[in-house]
Every structure is written in structure tokens, then in C-alpha cells.
């Protein structure tokens, strides 16, 4: 008998709220990363000239770095050897055509003001940008959830641009890994070599590196129906790559999988491992919920359940990346919503951020109830994270008249 989909949180789940929420215009320096190594340390980009800066007092004051990468910084992650990796984009948009370059710092831990940047990997000649630990197409930051203490870091191209072309240099079908904290990079998995040959429309979404499994998990979607053929019968559109030997496969459909879609059609964007080892996924278009895949053992999973609705069926909803500054912290996520795609109409859905205390007990953190999405409008959201003081920072851009891009801050209560 098919088990019942879990839709309600346990009765002992704490209720999390955002106290004293404040919406404000974007500051002159946009925060990109809250450091896992310093309780108040934040790293950002000055919008006037793309200079990098850091703050040691939760964004109250900033110090501008003397040096900066040659390209516009669009995302930052911390390596476990004490340095930063900075994704620079020649176009200023990580999903647009142009050259995306990974820069690594020298001297970050010991001499921030004198830090230098060296190009380590160039992703040129593609119409899709770097994702998963970097940025989605709207520039909202996805956290360093693909970085392991042993030096492994995973990333992939993201996007549907030119996805139906046979020109494979224009498609988001490649992923990469470094085993030395970003010094050198090798190919991880290509969707062109997995499953069917040249699967038009198939493209990567996001990835997660699991220290528990020593594996990379990569989600992928399609606009042509070829995704299930790549995954294979009885499999999800989530690939895994074993980092010890780069062998790969696809996660099997969990017993409850067909409860959500009626078949092998469910696609994901963001992926994050919870502290209990389960995997959380945000949706690509449908279903409109955050989903959790339970763990039974080493590299073994079982039922999938949804924990909180996300968006509606009236607009194209794409889940964002899942942010957790460090293990033991709450995780956060949000979404992108478009009421112009697929001929869909007004959703009357408000911008929202979500939180999970243990990594899988998702609930709504905050909504902008006074500004629901209208017909022909879009909203794009991204979470920066939470400081040790429980100060939350997020951004969202709405095309609704008079809104534009705004920064949300407040204090997370209930944890």
C-alpha cells in the first residue's frame, strides 16, 4: 500500500519567525557570503566598481580590498585551506554568454588587505553559467554546499540557453571537480556521456557534495522530455558521482515518488544534505513544495516526502539554492517565480523565505504579504544566510511596479 505523503511538521517542531524584519534598498556593498569561520565576518562586492570588501561587524562597516579579480565577482565560496574562490563573469551575469573564470586568493587567512587573485579555471564559450555553490541565472547566491574538507569542490554549468541545439559548446551539460581546494580542475560528469547520446534539452541544475557519502549529487532538467531517458527506468533525474573513482549512476525512485508526479517527471534545482543525512530538494516548476529524501544508511535512501508548499500552480516556480552557513545552523531557501512562462496567469503568491532547523523540517520564515505576484510579473529571491547573532540577510527582486531589488534583514527567533 502506498504510504501517505507527509505534509505537516512534527508537533514538537519549533516555530521559527523573523523578528523586526526590515526591507531596504540594496546597500553600496552587496554581501555575497557569510563566513563559516568567523561569527561576524561577511564578504561582499561594491556595486560601483566591483571591488571586493569584507566586514567584521555584520555589514555595519566595510574594508575595501586593494586588489580584485579582472572580472565582475558574482559569487564567493570559502575553501578548507583558508582561501576564497571567486567566480568572475565577463558579462556580469553568470548565466549569460561570456567567459566565467574561477579565481583563487593567496593570503586571505593571514593578510586580507594584501590578498591577490589568480585565475584557476575558465569556462568560456558557453551560454550557461556556473551553478551550485555559485549562482543561479538571476544572480542569487547558492552556498558552498559543494565543498568538502578534504579539498574536493564540485560545480556544474547551469541553464537552458541554447538547450535544444546540437552545438554542445552552448549547452549546460558539463560538471567539474577539484580535489586540491580549487587549484586544478577536471571533468566530473557530462550528460552527453550519460544515458542517451546527445540528449537535446537536458541541462544541469544544481549539485551538492556529501562528506558522509564522499559523493557529488547533481540534479538535471529537460525541456524536451529526454531527461527520464538519461536517468533510465526507475531512476530520478538526480545523478551521483562517487568521488573516489568518478563512477556515476542515478538515484532510484523512492517508494513515494509517484505520489507527487504519477511518473518519472519530477525535476529539482537546489540540493542540500541535512545534518541527519537526508537530502532536501527545491522544485523545478512542479510540484510546488520542498521535498526531503530520507536516509537509511551509507549511500542509501528511502521514502520522499514534502514538508512545506512552495509557490502555486498559477506561475512557474523554481526553487532556489539551499543555504546553511555551517553544520548545525538552520538552512534557508527561497524561489524564483514567473507568471509569464508557459501561458500561466496570476498566482497571487507572495515572495517568501523558508527555514529548516535540522535541515529537513521546513517551514515558512517570512512572507511579503502586501506584494503578491501579478500577471506578467516575476520575482527572484536569494538567501545570503544567518550570522551567529541570528541576524538574517536575504534579497529579492520583483518586477511589480515600485518594488525592484530589496534587501531583507531581521532576527531569526525560535532556535
Image (cartoon, rainbow, N blue to C red):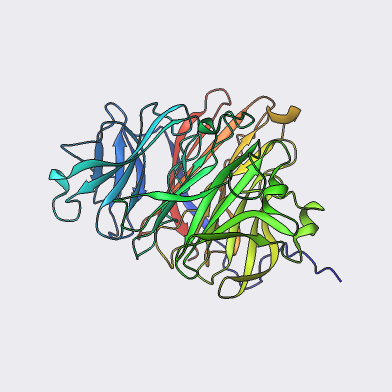
Residue 85, position as x, y percentages in the image: 31, 47
Q: Which quadrant of the rendered structure holds the N terminus?
A: bottom right
**Closest to the observer, 78 or 214:** 214
Residue 213 drawn above or below residue 376: below
Residue 27, position as x, y percentages in the image: 34, 34
Any part of residue 295 in sight: yes
**Closest to the observer, 83 or 19:** 83
Residue 57, position as x, y percentages in the image: 25, 51
Horizontally, residue 7 falls left or right of residue 95, namely right
| Snapshot quadrant of residue 400 | top right
Any part of residue 287 in sight: no
Residue 265 drawn above or below residue 11: above
Residue 137 drawn above or below residue 104: above
Looking at the image, the residue that sits furthest to the right is 1
Horizontally, residue 9 falls left or right of residue 88, namely right
| Snapshot quadrant of residue 113 | top left
Horizontally, residue 69 falls left or right of residue 401, namely left
Residue drawn at x 42%, y 66% as measured from the top left: 327
**Closest to the observer, 261 or 188:** 188
Amino acid at each position: 500500500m502506498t504510504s501517505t505523503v507527509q505534509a505537516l511538521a512534527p508537533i514538537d517542531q519549533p516555530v521559527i519567525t523573523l523578528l523586526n524584519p526590515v526591507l531596504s534598498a540594496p546597500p553600496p556593498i552587496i554581501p555575497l557570503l557569510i563566513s563559516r569561520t568567523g561569527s561576524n565576518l561577511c564578504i561582499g562586492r561594491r556595486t560601483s566598481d566591483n571591488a571586493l570588501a569584507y566586514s567584521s561587524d555584520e555589514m555595519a562597516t566595510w574594508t575595501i580590498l586593494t586588489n580584485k579579480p579582472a572580472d565582475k565577482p558574482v559569487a564567493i565560496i570559502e575553501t578548507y585551506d583558508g582561501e576564497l574562490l571567486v567566480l568572475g563573469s565577463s558579462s556580469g551575469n553568470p548565466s549569460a554568454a561570456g567567459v566565467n573564470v574561477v579565481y583563487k586568493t593567496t593570503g586571505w587567512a593571514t593578510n586580507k588587505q594584501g590578498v591577490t587573485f589568480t585565475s584557476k579555471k575558465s569556462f568560456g564559450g558557453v551560454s550557461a553559467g556556473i551553478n551550485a555553490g555559485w549562482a543561479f541565472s538571476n544572480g542569487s547566491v547558492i552556498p558552498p554546499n559543494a565543498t568538502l574538507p578534504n579539498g574536493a569542490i564540485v560545480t556544474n554549468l547551469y541553464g537552458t540557453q541554447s538547450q535544444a541545439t546540437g552545438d554542445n559548446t552552448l549547452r549546460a551539460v558539463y560538471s567539474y571537480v577539484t580535489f586540491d581546494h580549487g587549484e586544478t580542475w577536471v571533468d566530473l560528469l557530462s550528460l552527453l556521456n550519460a544515458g542517451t547520446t546527445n540528449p537535446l534539452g537536458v541541462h544541469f541544475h544544481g549539485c551538492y557534495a556529501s562528506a558522509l557519502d564522499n559523493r557529488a549529487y547533481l540534479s538535471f532538467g529537460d525541456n524536451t522530455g529526454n531527461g527520464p531517458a538519461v536517468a533510465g527506468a526507475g531512476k530520478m533525474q538526480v545523478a551521483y558521482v562517487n568521488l573516489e573513482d568518478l563512477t556515476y549512476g542515478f538515484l532510484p525512485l523512492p517508494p513515494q515518488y509517484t505520489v507527487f508526479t504519477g511518473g518519472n517527471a519530477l525535476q529539482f534545482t537546489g540540493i542540500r544534505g541535512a545534518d541527519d543525512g537526508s537530502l532536501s530538494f527545491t522544485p523545478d516548476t512542479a510540484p510546488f513544495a520542498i521535498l526531503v529524501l530520507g536516509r537509511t544508511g551509507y549511500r542509501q535512501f528511502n521514502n520522499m516526502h514534502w514538508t512545506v508548499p512552495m509557490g502555486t500552480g498559477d506561475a512557474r516556480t523554481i526553487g532556489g539554492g539551499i543555504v546553511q552557513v555551517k553544520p548545525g545552523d538552520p538552512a534557508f531557501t527561497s524561489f524564483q517565480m514567473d507568471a509569464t512562462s508557459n501561458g500561466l496567469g496570476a498566482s497571487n503568491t507572495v515572495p517568501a523565505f523558508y527555514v529548516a532547523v535540522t535541515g529537513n523540517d521546513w517551514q515558512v520564515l517570512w512572507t511579503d504579504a502586501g506584494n503578491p505576484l501579478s500577471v506578467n510579473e516575476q520575482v527572484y529571491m536569494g538567501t545570503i544566510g544567518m550570522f551567529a547573532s541570528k541576524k538574517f540577510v536575504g534579497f529579492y527582486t520583483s518586477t511589480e511596479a515600485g518594488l525592484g531589488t530589496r534587501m531583507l534583514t531581521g532576527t531569526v527567533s525560535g532556535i
